[in-house]
Structure formats: C-alpha cells, structure tokens
Image (tube, rainbow, N blue to C red):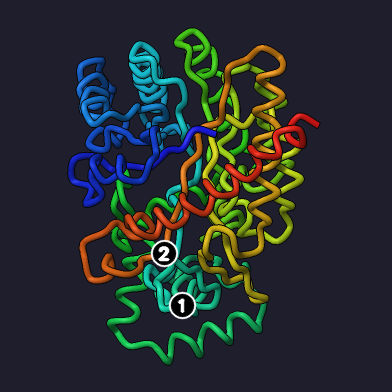
Amino acid sequence: MLEGWRWFGPDDPVTLEHVRHTGATEVVTALHGLNQGQVWTDEAVRERQAMVAAAGLRWSVVESIAVPETIKTRTGDFREAIERYKQSVRAVGRAGIGTICYNFMAITDWTRTDLAYRTATGALALRFDAVAFAAYDLFVLQRSGAADDYTPERIEAARHRLASMSEGDVAALERNLIEWLPARDVIYDRASFLRQLSIYRTIPTEEFRANLLDFVREIAPVAEEAGVRLAIHPDDPAFPLFGLPRVVSSADDLDALLAAVPSPANGVTFCTGSLGSNPANDVGAMARALGPRIFFAHLRNTAREADGSFHEAAHLDGDTDMIDVIAVLMKEEARREASGAADPIPMRPDHGHLMMTDIGTRTNPGYSGIGRLRGLAELRGVMRTLERKGADLRA
C-alpha cells in the first residue's frame, strides 16, 4: 500500500519536513480555507500541490472537499452548491490527484467526548463516553425528543454523571462535541446547533439516504470524466447521534450506495476505526466484501466497552484484527496487479495517541506526530512481513 500522512496545511504543527522524516511518500490534505462550499480553483490546487512536491512528497488524496449542509438536506442553494462541487472535482482531476475522500455525516464530523483520555500506558487518546454524551444530549443541549433515544437506565446514569461534573467539565464536553474539530467547515454554538438539528427533524433516514444517492449520481459522472475516484468515509462513530440520520454506518449502507451508483468512480474510504466503533460490524468481512471498491484506507483501532463507549487504541491493539485487514487489502492489491491494473491503495495511520514530547505542545487532537509515527511504524512492519509472504497474498 502507498504510505500516506494527513497534513492540515501550512499551519499544521507537523510540517511537511516532518512528514518526510516518517518515510511516508503520500500526502493527504485539502484546501482547508475553502471548506464552506467555495470552488477550488486550478490556481489554488496547483499552489498546494507545488508546496507538497517541493518537500519531495506527492499529494495523492484529497481529504476532503466538504459537502455543505445544504446539499445534505437539499435545501437553500443546494443546486448551486452541487455545481460548485463539480467544479472543484474537475480542478482536482486536472491536477492529476486521483482520489477524493468525503463524508456525508449530518452536521457532525467525527465525534468524541474526550480529546485527552489517559490510557494504561499514560499516553492520551480520543474517547467517546456514551454516558457523558447522553448527559450532554439530554440535560445540557436538551434536544427535543432526546429521551426517546435512551433507555431509562441510561437516562438515570446520565443524570448522575452530569451531577458529578463541574461547570468547566460541562463546558469542555460541549466544546468537544459541537464547537471544535480540525478543518471543520462550520463551528457551532448551542443555539446554532439546535437550529441545525431542527432541520433534520423533518428528514427521515431513508430521505437522507436518497439525498446521498442523488448527490453521488450527479458527482460520479463528473469524477469519471475528470479521472478522479470518490471514496466515501463511514460515519464516525458508526451509530446514530443527536437523533440524526446515519446512512454510511454498516455493510448494508455501503452495499446500497455502491449498488445504486455502480460507477467505477464510486467507492469507499475503508476506515477501520469508524466501522470498528460499532460491534455489529465485522470489519475484516467488510474489507473482503468491499475489496474492489476500496480506494483509500484509514487504519486505526478502537477498544469498545459494554456500555457503547470506546477509545482509540494503539493501531495493532483494540477490537479490530488489523493484521487480517491489512492482509485483505494487500491481497486486493495483488488481485488488481494480476489483472493488469497498477492500482495500489493509499493508506494513512489515523488518530495516533498523544505521547512523549508531544504532550504539552500545540497539536491537532488525534493528529500529533509521534503517535501517528508509532502507528505507521507498526502498520509498516505488518506490511513488510506480509510482503515476505507474497505467495500467500496471491493465493
């Protein structure tokens, strides 16, 4: 697989020079200043591409061209927003960048309650605490209808949790859930978040799925013509939050999208962490089933808890058999090569722990340098070992 690294642009504390130190060759980035539905111009794309190339690296995956809420809800100027999106896809294609990772999560992107959870090693991880989330949803946000989404036992546990929290704890929880995310297209406060939620109260899950399918049906032909492949990222976590519809959380969801839009430009970002957050997903089986449609891989692991909580585990630990997943992806690459296609899968180590001298420095939570470097080293070791067993990969 092609070894990649997510880079948030010139303001990222992990510089392109640091990326070179890791041994990665591929950069995964975006025009993060144009993340509210603006058109990506040829000039802007080429400027960022030249910056990456000057560091001896290659911009191989766009992550992401943000999909505006108007497109997801098919409200307001959604028709104009889709046309702007098409223009951006064409600009990426003209620059020779072959893959666009995107997501179709309503309002939220990846969601965690804790950005600095102390693990058994002392390193800090991202965590989703299901009880703390319920406490915020029920008693702080006070979302209309929230009580219908929880059992009486969970509501009582959430009430007790909130009672144990200080005002500072609650403020930090709210900031983590609705205000902060690296490169997020919109930052919400409580009032604006509730207003956006009210729009989705009128959009049932199947209507939201139809909105996704309609969007991909429009964009995929443009991507084909531009020589670009679309790789949708799963919901993170892969279960409902805030009463919002989730339509990219399961094997059935992905099968429905790929069947509805059979374009060769329509595929998947296989995120082991997102899919692994839901115990109903057999991540290895999904990798086998989706193989030919996997255009990009996010490799990270999660350790789940009985109450629905989870934290980001070390890359080779957690509930997903990462060695099996990598073997499946490498077998898929070998199959492509045998069929005459030079089509390796770009990957990147995702969501590393905050550790060692990175603690106390400025970082993007989940995207510190040393933690991801550890992850890349572990993943690279698995790949090198499997390469030595190349006959098994062609079996």
- Which quadrant would residue 85 be assigned to in this image? top left
Residue found at the far top of this picture: 225
Specify whether 369 is left or right of 285: left
Tell me which numbered mark, 2 or 1, is placed earlier along the sequence.
Answer: 1
| Numbered-mark total | 2
Residue at 62% of width from left, 69% of height from top?
A: 304
Q: Nearer the viewer, residue 22 or 208?
A: 22
Specify whether 103 is left or right of 97: right
Mark 1 belongs to which amino acid?
Thr
- Which quadrant would residue 316 be assigned to in this image? bottom right
The reply to whether residue 32 is in sight is yes
- Which quadrant would residue 39 be assigned to in this image? top left
Q: Nearer the viewer, residue 90 or 343?
A: 343
Residue at 30% of width from left, 56% of height from top?
A: 188
> Where, quadrant-wise, is the N terminus in this rendering?
top right
Q: Residues within 10 Å of mark 2 (few under 14, many from 20)?
A: many
> Where, quadrant-wise, is the C terminus in this rendering?
top right
Residue at 42% of width from left, 38% of height from top?
A: 4
Instruction: Establish if 270 lies above or below 291.
Output: below
> Distance of mark 2 from mark 1, alpha carbons?
10 Å
Mark 2 belongs to which amino acid?
His
The picture places residue 353, in percent across and down from the top left corner, at: 41, 64
Q: Nearer the viewer, residue 307 or 328?
A: 328
The picture places residue 146, in percent across and down from the top left corner, at: 55, 68
Give the number of the disc on residue 353: 2
- Secondary structure at badge 2 equals loop
Instruction: Establish if 92 lies above or below 239.
Output: above
The picture places residue 329, in percent across and down from the top left corner, at: 65, 37
- Secondary structure at badge 1 equals loop
Give the number of the disc on residue 121: 1
The picture places residue 247, in percent across and down from the top left corner, at: 62, 43
